[in-house]
Amino acid sequence: MFGAELVEHMADADTAAWGAVLAAPFIGSLLGVVVQRLPDGRPIALARSLCEECGAALAVRDLVPLFSWLASAGRCRFCGGPLGWFYPGVELAALAVALISVWVDSGAGAWLDCVLGWWLLTLGWIDLRRWLLPDALTLPLVVAGLAAAMAFNPEGLTDRAVGAAAGYIGLRAVGLLYSALRGREGLGQGDAKLLAAAGAWVGVRALPQVVLFAALAGVCAAACLRLAGVRLGAQSALPFGPFLAFATWLVWLTPMLTS
Ligand SMILES: [Zn+2]
């Protein structure tokens, strides 16, 4: 049913929204490069090599997202080594973000949903792999949220500026309290900056929902890992960024989902 509804909605969608869907796999490729290179401070360019094994150079025919990977059955054309799931995974996730955005929204709104979704996807993925939320991504996301408010929703600007401040101060206070009580850091500065970005997009009134959804998603993930046989003790933890990122996008989309 979801598929039929999506196809029907896509038929009605305007050219701008279609552009987002067509661009998504290519943007996904670029996000993959950012996820792999930004945490190490390596230059971001599409100059990645095709294969980690033999270092084969990437040709134009290898740059078509998803299709290149499918055409070569996920193997390097030169050494036959597996190319791994990382790039097709990010490209598929970026496509999913675009399809959901076009499904719930239209025109410039759909693009805005995509930009926020792709940005949060990149942050969540980096945190999952590296336990790191780079300032180079969180701080511009705060600015982008306030700029989007000025452009599309000027009357909501105060709510969103207060949201950014409250998000940072709130999570920083919890983090400091936690490390005082437990003697180890539970919430990093990066999490506080990400919640500031969340506040700059969803506003201060929706901020409690973001924290609640993120916490619930985290508890669900921990329960799933436990069921899968992974033991999480008091000393082990999951990065909070991916859950915060997911919850932020969900709360941002809520008005579109319920209207
Ligand atoms: Zn190779």
Image: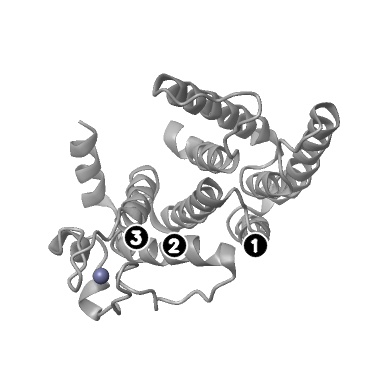
Residue 174 % position (x, y): 78, 33
Q: What element carries label 1?
A: helix
Mark 2 residue's CB less than 8 Å from ligand 1: no
Residue 221 % position (x, y): 48, 28
Mark sitting on residue 24: 3
Q: Residue at x 56, y 51 (%)?
A: 130
Residue nearest the viewer, comparing 130 with 134: 130
Left or right side of 25 for 31 = right
Q: Which of marks 2 and 3 is nearer the N terminus?
A: 3
Residue nearest the viewer, comparing 113 with 9: 113
Q: Residue at x 60, y 38 (%)?
A: 240
Query: Which kind of residue does numbered mark 1 sit on?
Result: Pro
Q: Earlier in the sequence, mark 1 or mark 3?
A: 3
Q: Is mark 2 on a helix, strand or loop?
A: helix
Q: Distance between the residues labelled 1 and 3?
A: 21 Å
Query: Which kind of residue does numbered mark 3 sit on?
Result: Ala
Left or right side of 5 for 177 = right
**Quarter-of-image position of residue 15:** bottom left
Mark sitting on residue 31: 2
Q: Distance between the residues labelled 2 and 1?
A: 16 Å
